[in-house]
Amino acid sequence: KEVIARAIHRASHRSDEVFISVDLGAITESLFESELFGYKKGAFTDAKEDRAGRFEAANKGTIFLDEIGNLSPNLQSKLLSVIQSRKVVRLGSNKETAIDVRLICATNMPLYQMVNEGKFRQDLLYRINTVEIKLPSLRERTEDIELLVDHFLNQYCKKYKLVKKRMNASTIKRLTSHH
C-alpha cells in the first residue's frame, strides 16, 4: 500500500515536497493527537518543547494514513475535523495552523460494511474516498510473483555485491501455486 502511495506522490505536483507515512494501527489512542496534530511545551508531563505533528510536517506534501479502518469512533471524529477544516490545533494550544496536504488512506478493513454497522463514520468515508483504488492481494495476481522475485533478487544482489541470481522455474511454480 505504501509503495502505491509513494508512486502517487512522486507522480504529483507535490513530488518535491515531503511524504509522511503514518501507521494508524501502531499509534495508541492516547498518543493519536500529539502524534498527528502536535503539541505545545507543557501540554503534558513529557512535553519539554513544542513539536509539530505529522499533518504539519506534511504541509504542502503528502500524508499517507495506513490502517485507517482501525481508528476508534472518537479518533475518527478528530481526524474528520482536521480534514474538513484543513487546520490543526496542537495539544496545549488554541491556535489553529492551516495545512495543505494530499491525503492518501489505506485499509484492509471493509469500510462500507463498517459504515453500515456503525463502526466507521460515513462522513469520514465520504471525505477520504475521493478516488478509490482497489489493490488485489498477491494471491489474486500471481503473475506478479515472478516479477517481484526478480526485483528483490536484483535489489539484494546489488546491495550485497553478488553476481546476479535467478530463481529456478520449479521454485517460481511453487510460489505461484501457494495460496
Image: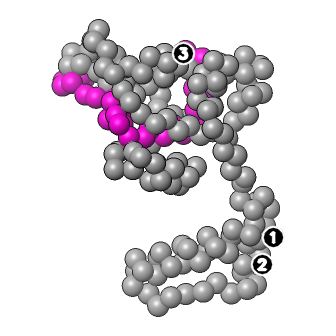
Within the image, what quadrant is residue 46 found in? top left
On screen, residue 39 versus residue 162, left or right, reads left
Secondary structure, mark 2, is helix
Q: Quadrant of the C terminus?
A: bottom right
Q: Is residue 130 magenta?
A: no
Residue 67 location, x and y as percent? Answer: 58, 37
Residue behind mark 1: 177
Residue behind mark 3: 77
Render colour scheme: one colour
Asked if residue 20 shows in the view, the reply is no
- Looking at the image, which residue is at 64% across and 84% down? 167
Q: Is residue 62 magenta?
A: yes
Measure the alpha-carbon separation of dots 1 and 3. 43 Å
- Looking at the image, which residue is at 47% across and 75% down? 155
- Looking at the image, which residue is at 55% across and 74% down? 151
Q: State whether residue 91 is above or below residue 9.
A: above
Asked if residue 176 shows in the view, the reply is yes
Residue behind mark 2: 173
On screen, residue 48 versus residue 3, left or right, reads left
Within the image, what quadrant is residue 174 found in? bottom right
Q: Residues within 10 Å of mark 1 (few under 14, many from 20)?
A: few
Q: How many marks?
A: 3
Query: Disc 1, disc 3: CB below 8 Å?
Result: no
Within the image, what quadrant is residue 169 found in? bottom right
On screen, residue 146 versus residue 163, left or right, reads right
Secondary structure, mark 3, is helix
Q: Residues within 10 Å of mark 3 (few under 14, many from 20)?
A: some
Secondary structure, mark 1, is helix
Instruction: Give amino acid for label 2.
Output: Lys
Measure the alpha-carbon separation of dots 2 and 3. 47 Å
Q: Which residues are magenta?
A: 45-74
Whichever of callouts 1 and 3 sits on the residue coming sooner in the sequence is: 3
